[in-house]
């Protein structure tokens, strides 16, 4: 595997940011590389903000889509291929001395597999700390800002909806065709299973998206603004910077405790 050379330092060790997106259809108005544009920008923003604490690998542009293969333009590596590839990346980096990793995704279909990867990595490489989270712009710092400033109601940010469209209007407006936007929110919803960016209810399932969308979009892209895209990018980076700080805190505390336990 051609893993780029990293400038790793034992003191202080850096968190390696490993970001993955996807190539998939985003309705009629957004490009297929939407996920890659967004997560690579966030990742670079984190690396630029705290270069002594984090550094990034080039983005893996392909991911897993197990629910929307019927929409033309959607790729799918498959879960096992994706997991094996990412685990090999972690193995190679671990061999080179890295011991803390943050796996970040711009595509929801990757997230459950990234959780598996972190669990496998923790089992195989006991000395490392590998962590992930649900997508981006969805945690303790960014989520409140999104909820306060969004224009759509629940269901408006599922896929190619308000959030992703706002990001792209800010980052790559020339790739957005707003005259083609089709708002779709007719997801078959119940109290414990629905579709939105941050929450999806307590049930986990994987029905085909063709039940719920005719265009491959789910949400209200028509209300998106570049101003919100810029606002949400700022807090997304801030949130990821905070996560990097927690990863350092976790790993440093664990290493210190292990050293203390080994003392006579």
Image (tube, grey):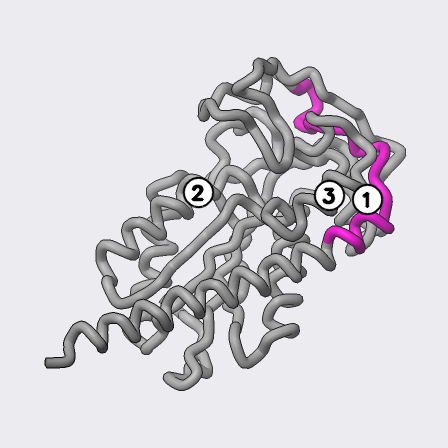
For label 1, the residue is: 176
Residue 43 location, quadrant: bottom right
Looking at the rendered image, the disc whose residue lies closer to the viewer, 3 or 1, is 3
| Magenta stretch, residue numbers | 213-232
Residue at left offset 61%, top offset 31%: 72
For residue 77, the mark is 2
Regarding mark 3 in the picture, which secondary structure is present there?
A: helix
Q: Report if residue 143 is visible in the image.
A: yes
Per the model, the C-alpha gap separating discs 3 and 1 is: 21 Å
Image position, residue 96 (x, y; %): 32, 77
Left/right of residue 227 with respect to residue 39 in the rendered view: right
- Residue 146's tag is 3
At a point 40% along the width and 86% down the height, the residue shown is 11
> Image check: 131 left or right of 143?
left
> Front-most of 124 and 213?
124
Q: Is residue 259 above or below residue 130?
A: below
Report the Cα–Cα distance between label 2 and label 3. Answer: 31 Å
- Estimate the x, y position of residue 66 in percent, counting from the top left: 46, 31
């Amino acid at each position: 595997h051609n893993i780029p050379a990293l400038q790793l330092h034992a003191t202080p060790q850096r968190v390696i940011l490993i970001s993955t997106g996807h190539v998939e259809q985003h309705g009629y108005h957004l490009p297929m590389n939407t996920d890659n544009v967004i997560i690579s920008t966030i990742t670079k923003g984190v690396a630029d903000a705290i270069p002594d604490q984090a550094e990034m690998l080039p983005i893996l542009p392909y991911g897993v889509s197990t629910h929307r293969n019927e929409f033309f333009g959607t790729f799918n590596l498959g879960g096992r291929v994706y997991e094996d590839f990412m685990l090999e990346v972690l193995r190679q980096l671990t061999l080179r001395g890295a011991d803390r990793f943050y796996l970040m995704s711009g595509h929801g279909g990757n997230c459950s597999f990234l959780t598996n990867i972190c669990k496998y990595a923790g089992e195989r490489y006991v000395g490392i700390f590998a962590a992930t989270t649900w997508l981006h712009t969805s945690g303790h710092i960014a989520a409140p800002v999104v909820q306060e400033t969004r224009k759509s109601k629940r269901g408006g940010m599922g896929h190619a909806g308000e959030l992703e469209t706002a990001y792209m209007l800010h980052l790559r407006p020339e790739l957005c065709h707003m005259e083609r936007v089709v708002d779709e929110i007719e997801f078959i919803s119940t109290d414990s299973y629905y579709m939105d960016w941050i929450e999806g209810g307590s049930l986990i399932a994987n029905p085909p998206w063709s039940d719920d969308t005719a265009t491959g979009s789910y949400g209200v892209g028509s209300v998106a603004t570049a101003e919100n895209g810029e606002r949400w990018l700022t807090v997304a980076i801030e949130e990821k910077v905070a996560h990097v700080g927690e990863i350092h805190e976790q790993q440093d505390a664990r290493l210190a405790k292990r050293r203390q336990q080994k003392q006579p």
